[in-house]
Image (tube, rainbow, N blue to C red):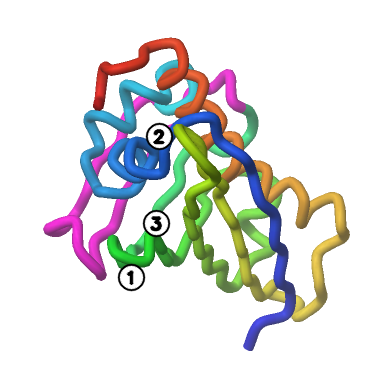
Amino acid sequence: MVVGRVTDECPVAVSLELLWKVVFTGDVSIFTKACVGMVDAVEVEGDGGPGSVTIMKLNPAVGDAKVFKTRLLARDAAARVVKSELVVEGGELAGQMKSQVSEVKVVPAGEGACVVHMTVEYERVDGAPLPPADEAMIVQGYLSLIKKVEEYLVAHPGEFA
């Protein structure tokens, strides 16, 4: 049962192919390098396909949350869509959530650019919707990772091309 649904989008000044390669193919070494200062380590339990669990350890400078665990539900490379179930350990929202599922779709936006469409569906333990500010914080958490990768790729063109 979904209680809340939050959507947002984010323009990115790198190509769809490059962003997909760095963020969504499952190569954690590339992702960790692009998110230096935000993500300290990433580990994958499983083969990287559906059902695999990714453990992302955040840098203390990022804020309250310490570790994100994500279980990959689906990755469609042709449609450029990834769907994951997220469990947050640490942070104010962690004890409030019963479930949280995110879907990211990356679409081209001209030469060397793309747009990331983010949807998060959640259910709270108490069954109530989150206040709008908390909903925005959830989506911005995801999109801040995308913006960090974009920042790195723009500063280091060709590194992962």
Residue under the point 60% across and 42% down: 143
Q: Tell me the magenta residue range.
A: 40-62
The kind of residue on which mark 2 rests is Lys
Which mark is on residue 74? 1
Q: Are marks 1 and 2 in contact (CB under 8 Å)?
A: no
Rendered position, 153 above or below 19 = above
Q: Are marks 1 and 3 in contact (CB under 8 Å)?
A: no
Percent of width and height locating residue 129: 81, 72
The kind of residue on which mark 1 rests is Ala
Badge 2 crowding class, 10 Å Cα cut-off, few under 14, some 14 to 19, many 20 or more, is some
Q: Tell me how far mark 1 sits from mark 3, CA to CA.
A: 12 Å
The kind of residue on which mark 3 rests is Thr
Q: Which residue is mark 2?
A: 57
Q: Residue furthest left?
A: 47
Residue under the point 57% across and 47% down: 115
Percent of width and height locating residue 43: 24, 41
Quadrant where the C terminus is found in the figure = top left
Q: Which residue is mark 3?
A: 70
